[in-house]
Image (tube, rainbow, N blue to C red):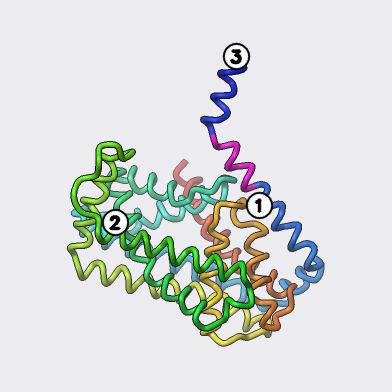
């Protein structure tokens, strides 16, 4: 009896499985990177970067966070909720800290929960976050298609496949969101919540100016994201054309976002090595650029940590 109960609990609670997958993914990625480069050379490449190279990732990621808060505020306004920009900023920074602190990640869930607790409630917060992410997809699809068509990703088959899969899934999500009409069948899980989410999204979709503004600002965010890598390449004396950077950075990020590692450790460095080495960038410099770029996320997490401490 006890053994059967234990087996049921193990199979129902999949958290251990997710943690195991992330741990294995991180381990495999780190082993691959370690085999490709000596870490003493990577540290030398990082220390050789000028001071301004360390400021850019943190500065741009903070600007991105402010712009994300503006996008969320526009969507909340369309949903009839007035949220202060400072409150949204506080939630996004603290949510980023949670995502970095927990091995399983979950910064988007944390951000949504924090925004919900600040006043709008979970339903509106989920609708706003989902709307912002959906309106980001067209930009990513365009950039990934450019990466495939231009041939930039052909030198890294893993990134090429990641881009192709993301384009397919994202296109299906957009089509489903655009064509969803009528009531959902009774058997659909979480039917009530999904109906409410769809109703809120239709309110946002009916506001054309807000849709255009949010999507346009999303394109600006994507370009800023790529400009960080381009600036780091310049700092490392390995400058590539900006259109090449626009092609491979989104594909590398798709790979980094996959829930197969702990905070992208190992996968991040592997993705940048696969993307940059074929273009003549030394593998040590490629890994150094990936790590230096990550300092922007660490800076945002540090700000979120300080905000948590101030609240306590």
Give yes or no for residue 243 being in the magenta stretch. Answer: no
Task: Say which residue appears at 59% left-offset and 39% top-offset.
Answer: 17
Mark 1 lies on a secondary structure that is helix
Secondary element at image label 2: loop
What residue is shown with label 2? 84
Q: Quadrant of the N terminus?
A: top right
Q: Which range of residues does the magenta coloring cover?
A: 14-22
Q: Is residue 269 above or below residue 88?
A: below
Q: Which residue is painted at 42% across and 55% down in the image?
A: 92
- N-terminal of the two: label 1 or label 2? 1
Q: Residues within 10 Å of mark 2 (few under 14, many from 20)?
A: few
Residue at mark 3: 2
Q: CA distance from mark 1 to mark 2?
A: 39 Å
Q: Residues within 10 Å of mark 1 (few under 14, many from 20)?
A: many
Residue 167, numbered circle: none
- 163 shown above or below 25: below
* Image mark for residue 25: 1
Q: Nearer the viewer, residue 28 or 3?
A: 3
The location of residue 148, given as percent across then percent down, is: 51, 77
> Which callout, 1 or 2, points to the residue nearer the camera?
1
As helix, strand or loop, the secondary structure at mark 3 comes to helix
């Amino acid at each position: 009896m006890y053994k059967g109960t234990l087996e049921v609990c193990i199979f129902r609670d999949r958290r251990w499985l997710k943690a195991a997958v992330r741990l294995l993914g991180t381990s495999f990625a780190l082993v691959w990177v370690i085999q490709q480069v000596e870490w003493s050379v990577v540290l030398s490449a990082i220390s050789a970067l000028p001071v301004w190279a360390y400021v850019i990732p943190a500065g741009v990621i903070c600007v991105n966070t402010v712009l994300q808060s503006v996008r969320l505020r526009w969507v909340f306004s369309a949903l009839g909720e007035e949220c202060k920009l400072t409150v949204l900023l506080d939630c996004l920074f603290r949510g980023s800290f949670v995502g970095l602190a927990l091995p399983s990640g979950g910064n988007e869930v944390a951000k949504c929960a924090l925004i919900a607790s600040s006043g709008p409630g979970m339903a509106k917060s989920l609708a706003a976050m989902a709307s912002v992410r959906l309106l980001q997809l067209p930009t990513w699809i365009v950039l990934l298609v450019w990466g495939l068509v231009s041939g930039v990703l052909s030198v890294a088959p893993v990134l090429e496949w990641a881009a192709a899969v993301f384009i397919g899934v994202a296109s299906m999500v957009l089509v489903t969101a655009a064509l969803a009409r009528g009531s959902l069948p009774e058997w659909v899980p979480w039917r009530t919540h999904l109906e409410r989410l769809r109703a809120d999204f239709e309110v946002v979709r009916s506001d054309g100016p807000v849709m255009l503004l949010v999507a346009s600002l999303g394109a600006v965010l994507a370009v800023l994201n790529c400009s960080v890598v381009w600036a780091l390449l310049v700092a490392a004396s390995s400058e590539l054309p900006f259109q090449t950077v626009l092609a491979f950075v989104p594909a590398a990020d798709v790979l980094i976002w996959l829930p197969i590692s702990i905070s992208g450790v190992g996968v991040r460095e592997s993705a940048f090595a696969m993307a940059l080495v074929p273009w003549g960038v030394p593998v040590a410099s490629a890994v150094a650029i990936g790590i230096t770029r990550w300092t922007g996320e660490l800076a945002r997490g540090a700000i979120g940590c300080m905000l948590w401490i101030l609240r306590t």
